[in-house]
Image (tube, grey):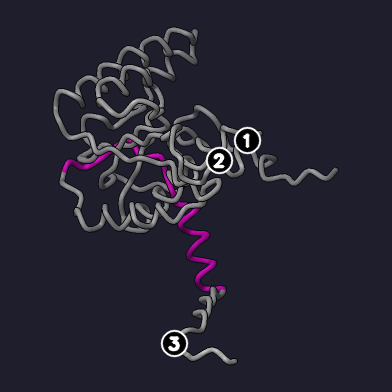
Amino acid sequence: MSESPSSAAPLPPAFDDAFRARLADLFAWRRDVRRFRTDPVDEAVLRTCLDWAALAPSVGNSQPWRFVRVSEPRRRASVAASFERCNAAARATYADERQGLYARLKLAGLREAPVHLAVFCDSGTEAGHGLGRATMPEMLRYSVAACIHAFWLAARAHGLGVGWVSILEPAIVTQALDVPEGWDLIAYLCVGHPVEEHADPELVRHGWQERHPETARLLER
């Protein structure tokens, strides 16, 4: 019996050379943004970016990512205080010129970014029924990382900047945000319109670390 047109599977889109070139631009121009304008982010745009991010792959289709928007000033202040403590401690681990260079870097946009998103992994989720993680339970966290990258690209495609703040105390942030037990902090993201646009990463531009072309090298075994 042949399928009726309405029940047939939809045809996949054709991605041509022009699309691939634009996609390459999107990957190349994704930046870790630390300098934000303070004007608000359109709510519909933010929701669209989250919807696109939710299309990310996940182990066993577990979809373990949990996004928390942090708007309350008291909670934001607690996160900012954690960053200040951790940043000072990290700066002290360097010496001489490297310490001075570290001190000059802007490593977070916590005070300027209009949107703060904490991204958690729901380690206790029953979704996916454990498929694919009996031998590699860390796949839940890797799935959240894939979702974050998808959100990052979606935001960039909509003209937004994203900055991942990792200089934080996960336990302190988790406590400040009062999330369910079993949620593990994976990322704290600052989101907003960037003040400036650059083709090169900030840490390259300010002399901290060059890109290593060999990281794209394919090893054969």
Q: Secondary structure at mark 3?
A: loop
Q: Secondary structure at mark 2?
A: loop
Q: Earlier in the sequence, mark 1 or mark 3?
A: 3
Q: Are marks 1 and 2 in contact (CB under 8 Å)?
A: yes
Q: Nearer the viewer, residue 115 or 120?
A: 120
Within 10 Å of the Cα at label 1, are there few (<14), some (14-19), or many (20+) other Cα atoms?
few
Residue 84, percent across and down? 30, 16
Q: Which residue is mark 1?
A: 134
Q: Nearer the viewer, residue 55 or 21?
A: 55
Q: Quadrant of residue 206?
A: top left
User: Disc 2 marks which amino acid?
Assistant: Gly
Residue 78, percent across and down? 23, 19
Q: Earlier in the sequence, mark 2 or mark 3?
A: 3
Which of the numbered marks, if any, corresponds to residue 130? 2
Task: Tell me which segment is drawn in magenta.
Answer: 17-38
Looking at the image, which residue is at 49% across and 91% down?
4
Is 193 placed above or below 45 here?
above
Q: Quadrant of residue 167?
A: top left
Quadrant location of the C terminus in the rendered image = top right
Asked whether residue 23 is drawn in magenta, I would say yes
Q: Which residue is mark 3?
A: 6
Is 149 placed above or below 211 here?
below
Within 10 Å of the Cα at label 2, are there few (<14), some (14-19), or many (20+) other Cα atoms?
some
Looking at the image, which residue is at 26% across and 52% down?
46
User: Disc 3 marks which amino acid?
Assistant: Ser
Q: Nearer the viewer, residue 181 or 68?
A: 181
